[in-house]
Amino acid sequence: MSDLHDRAEAAGLIRQWQDAKGEDQLVSDEALEAILACLDDDAIEERFVSADVGGIVVLPLGWRAGPAELRLESGDTRKVALSEDDDRVCLTGIATPGYHHLRQDDRELTVAIAPLRCPSPPAGRHWGSAVQIPSLREGHGAYGDFASLAQAAATLGRAGAAAVAISPVHALFPADASRFSPYAPSSRLFRNAWLAPAGEPVAEAEELIDWSTAAPDRMRDLRIVYDRLSDADRTTFAEWRQAQGERLQAQAVFDALHGYFLARNGASGWQQWPDEFHDPAGEAVRGFVADHADAVAFHAFAQWHADRGLARAADAAREASMAIGLIADLAIGVAGDGADSWSRPQDVLTGLSIGAPPDPLGPDGQNWGITALSPFALRRQGFAPFIGTLRAILAHAGGVRIDHALGLGRLWVIPEGRTADQGAYLTMPFDHMLRILKIEAHRANDGRGAIVIGEDLGTVPPGFRDVMADAGMLGMRVLPFERDTEGDFVPSEDWSADAIAMTATHDIATVAGWWQGRDLEWRATIAGKPVSSDQQDERADERSRLWDKIGDHPMPQEAAPVVDAAISAVASSPCPLAIIPAEDLLGLVEQPNLPGTIDEHPNWRRRLPNTLDAAFADPVVATRIATLNAR
């Protein structure tokens, strides 16, 4: 093995990997060199270890068998004896979950002890819906916000739903209305200010959201709310702002700077600012804060107001007797030119973006244009960045969906300026991150706990789903993807009980859209050519295969009976929770997002045709809800 290959292995780069066809692929030496040049993988003194309750804690090199002191997170201390086993120094018998501290002589480290499993779903089988918050009609604004979500949650709860799943509500770029994708956030520690309730309802709202006017209008309305704050609210906000500390200040400063330079010279991210503003602690930034204290305070207020709105939506879900409540969505990473990357560049993979290797669905691979937490930074900082991220996402949630759950174990990293096929898998500290996830999930929701769903669609390594199941992390079983080796649909009664069941996701066609071939039409339109006869024949065959598993009479031409049957099939699975997107409950044809497109398809811009309350009064929709409740 060459020195380059040794260095790559030591850094956690996976040189040989299997593609979607199960064929071995080898990362080029050139790609390894380019990736290694971006990694800050200097020797790290291990200051964090983890184990499950009652398990063996293996200590790093340098620790010795003998007496030590364990300080529990509660503050209680006790003497412990470290033992040696197979040349390893170990600690056993810790039965209390939490982040404890072990000390021996001048050495100290954090010992994270996790529950054996993530919190279990409520007993029985339940259903919920997935909504794109901006698509909601509640509130009659230009788009839905957290107040709309509160009303929608109440409606769903009254209808019998146990949960409402939402797309990420991470902080975006408040001054840049073009950056409205929820999966490319500026920060995962704070909220999307555009979703903070403000302003008067409008009489007529368009079918598609025009973010270029809607987002600036919302920021204007939020400024009016800020200027009119009562003395009591101003005091409450000031206390909250102080309690949030330096991370909120950094977020507010970034948002103020971003708006300033975007307006001044069109800078879309901090790398395009003058060099002296690249250092958050530098003199230029301090001077800006002093001169623009009001703008900084306003952006801090926007975060407070948004967080209160999200909290009220969570309260509305609980008050509607939802057994789970809000299921938040954790994006896999952040924009490399956003607040997190500016204020804490040492936390992220600088110079690298993440994505996916080439596969049959994407022969060129995928570059998502975002970065992620660095495994080396996590180890250096005792995983504080990951813990903080989980606490932010779980603050008002009864559940969380981990986008691309495989990313807890490995990330496909791509050097800037290179194509996705020039990447490689970088190993993440999966065992530690999974245990932290279990600890934080049990503490969430005011101690009631939050269920954890891992997005495990597509190609996953053998055994990964078993590891998820053992940890109590629910997978996802989505109707169009549940096929056997012959391409036939697997009956829903044979789906795994270690997962949630879904008719569709926001990234694929709705049931009605798939049945009618609307997704094929979109792809053909974008490609500038008609749907081919081969594609039409293949979809006809797939429709027949699906109906063979979910239908009980001749195959219909119209989509409505197929939507009914799909919902019934998904609700009949042994999964503890069935999630039906609002688009499928209402039998809509168009999907919220078409991956691989930016302007060609109106991603994240579609509105629902009516409020959920009005839609549920439709006898067809009411029958679908009755089916869900009966199943």
Image: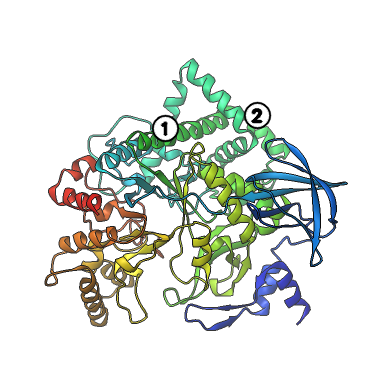
SS assignment at label 1: helix
Question: What amino acid is found at the position of numbered circle 1 in the picture?
Answer: Arg
Q: Which residue is mark 1?
A: 220
Q: Position of residue 118 (x, y in %)?
A: 51, 52
Q: Nearer the viewer, residue 166 or 87?
A: 87
How far is mark 2 from mark 1, CA to CA? Answer: 23 Å
For the point 45% across and 35% down, which residue is it?
A: 306
Crowding near pointer 2: few (<14 within 10 Å), some, many (20+)? few
**Is 127 left, or right, of 474 in this rendering?**
left
Crowding near pointer 1: few (<14 within 10 Å), some, many (20+)? some
**Is 249 left, or right, of 548 in this rendering?**
right
Residue 554 occupies quadrant: bottom left
Residue 141 occupies quadrant: top left
**Is 588 left, or right, of 180 in this rendering?**
left
Residue located farthest toward the right when viewing the structure as drawn: 105
Question: What amino acid is found at the position of numbered circle 2 in the picture?
Answer: Ala
Q: Which mark is residue 290?
A: 2
Q: Quadrant of the N terminus?
A: bottom right
Q: Position of residue 16 (x, y in %)?
A: 62, 79
Q: Position of residue 573 (x, y in %)?
A: 31, 61
**Is 563 left, or right, of 209 in this rendering?**
left
528, above or below 597, in the image:
below
Closer to the chain start, of discs 2 and 1, is 1
Q: Nearer the viewer, residue 329 or 497?
A: 497
For the point 68% across and 54% down, which residue is it?
A: 50
Query: Does any portion of residue 284 appear in the rendered image?
Result: yes
Q: Quadrant of the C terminus?
A: bottom left
SS assignment at label 2: helix
Q: Position of residue 144 (x, y in %)?
A: 33, 41
Q: Nearer the viewer, residue 457 or 100?
A: 100
219, above or below 126, in the image:
above
150, above or below 599, in the image:
above
